[in-house]
Amino acid sequence: MLKTHSCGELNKNHVGARVTLAGWVDRRRDQGGLIFIDLRDGQGIVQVVFNPEVSKPCHDIASEMRNEYVVRVSGEVAPRPPGTENPKLPTGDIEVIAHNTDILNPSKTPPFYINEDTEVEESLRLRYRYLDLRRERMKENLILRHKVVKFMRDFLDARGFIEVETPILIKSTPEGARDYLVPSRLYPGKFYALPQSPQQLKQLLMVAGVERYFQIARCFRDEDTRADRQPEFTQLDLEMSFVEEEDILSLLEELLTSMVETIKPEMRLMKPFPRLTYAEAMERYGTDKPDLRFGMEIGDLSDIVAQSNFSIFRSAIAGGGKVKGICVPCCATYTCSQLDELNKMVRGLGAEGLVTMALGGGTGSLNDLTGEMVKSVVTKFLTLDQVKEIAGRLGAGMGDLLLIIAGKKTRLVNTALSELRREMGHRLKLAEPDLLAFTFIVDYPLLQWNEETKQWESMHHPFTAPKDEDVPLLDSAPEKVRAKHYDIVCNGYELSSGSLRIYTSHLQRRIFKLLGYSDEEVEERFGHFLEAFDYGAPPHGGIAPGIDRIVMLLAGEETIREVIAFPKSQTAADLTFDAPSPVTDEQLAELHLRLREE
């Protein structure tokens, strides 16, 4: 080893010891006679003193050092002089008096400060990711990720799970997103696909008798990126045989609860995890990934305004739609420009517009509300009793602001109000930052109708089992069939989807037919899978929490790029390696490929 100790482990117990350290120059201070260097390695920082009276050659070399130089220092640990201690550093009570030193590698001036947590343009950080990872916040994020993955492995190992690796090069199968395709040199014109998830593979492991499987799985999806999405990501993939839904949900709740309490005990949890049906979540929050750290629930006002004189409300309801709203506390004083901003926001989401209603007049009760206290363009179309009933339905009081949206498409109304709720919760800082509100969403629809293709699509994936009692509805009323499908969400983010799986070839073929696959397509794409079910497949199910998103929430970050060592940019580009990039004609020829001019 080039060093005897790490910088961060030194303390008063090492006073008088001779040590050899190696690391990066974090800061350099030349005090004329003495040179002080903060030496940094992966475990921490310690102050090193270069005194020409102790070693003139050592002092001369230190005068050449600059930030991010890689250096080695040998010396004696000494207590810092009284009054010079640094309580901000774990090593702040001691320093190392240098006797020998050498520069292992100089460094150019970095493109941004390593020793300061200053704002740096993300593209620059990703271009020099190896420098960005030296920064304290990023180092802590990597350590946190390591602890999370290790906890998961230990937790599942103690409960009889075994870790099994599955292939990265597999067959292209539809699972909800585009595949990344890999051309085969040995089989011209044929392709492998990178797995969107190990879905079929883990189900085949259940057929193989591996009753409790898990894997820290790499997954690949060619889809548009966003803050909590990457082209390649990591999930805790687990599957169990001979289980019911409750077994899987209980296991995951125990895993997440004990993980947070062990690794991030300063964070608070809502316990036990609330459970909402998909229908309840959409009705109360407008989304199947609600943030439950604050209220502001959506209320259905359709029955109150159905007979009002406001034509927009009446036509929405007559067209099969809804009129819904939320109450924003203490915002009745919002200005016209602020309300216009919210109106533009919902129009951008596809809504026709926003109806606002400010309940002024101090802090009295709704019983004291008069028509003059209500500021809204629709008051002339509503009676005072209707206004009070609307306010009561939304849980409003004096001084609150009501935001109402009407539309013939209920899903669009829900989406717009959900985004309004998220935005206002953020503006008013209603969500406690140290609270993790894990929530299970259950009883999803099995299918959804695609208006463009005029076909049924899987809400989750085609291997999800329908509720037993709803199987007779598959032919007569597919839209009413509920799935044995469940999600876990936290603070407005979907962390995981899971389900009990179909495990008989007869039912699986029936679902494929409902999704529009011909018998030939089924055999070509899924024949290997269906054949396995005819050899004694057990009932099974699983779930796959996203590790990137979990670590993001635990670290208090806004994007999963902050907790991935080498992520892609928002445009799915690797700025460190400049990928994707062209390949040579020789490489294309080996793969029997030719690029077509656009």
Image (tube, helix red, strand yellow):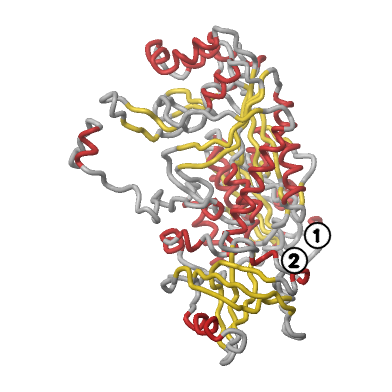
Nearest the viewer among 425 and 584 is 584
Outermost residue, bottom side: 32
Disc assigned to residue 238: none
The image shows residue 45, relative to residue 234, as above or below, that is: below
Nearest the viewer among 273 and 503 is 503
Tell me the crowding category of disc 2: few under 14, some 14 to 19, or many 20 or more residues within 10 angstroms, Cα based. Answer: some
Residue at 70% across, 28% down = 248
Residue 255 in sight in this render: yes
Secondary element at tag 1: helix
Looking at the picture, which amino acid does disc 2 mark? Gly
| Residue 71 as seen in the image, left or right of residue 95 | left
Disc assigned to residue 361: 2
Residue at 26% across, 25% down = 189
Secondary element at tag 2: loop
The image shows residue 123, relative to residue 257, as above or below, that is: below
Residue at 66% across, 43% down = 150
Residue at 80% across, 59% down = 368
Label 1–label 2 contact, CB within 8 A = yes
The image shows residue 74, relative to residue 54, as above or below, that is: above
| Residue 221 horizontal/vertical position (percent) | 45, 37
Outermost residue, left side: 597
| Residue 25 horizontal/vertical position (percent) | 54, 73
Which quadrant of the figure has residue 192?
top left
| Residue 266 horizontal/vertical position (percent) | 76, 56
Name which of mark 1 and mark 2 comes first in the sequence: 2
Nearest the viewer among 235 and 376 is 235
Q: Quadrant of the N terminus?
A: bottom right
- Give the residue number, with chain letter if any, for mark 1: 368
Looking at the picture, which amino acid does disc 1 mark? Asp
| Residue 441 horizontal/vertical position (percent) | 67, 35
Q: Quadrant of the C terminus?
A: top left
How many angstroms separate mark 1 from mark 2 (CA)? 9 Å
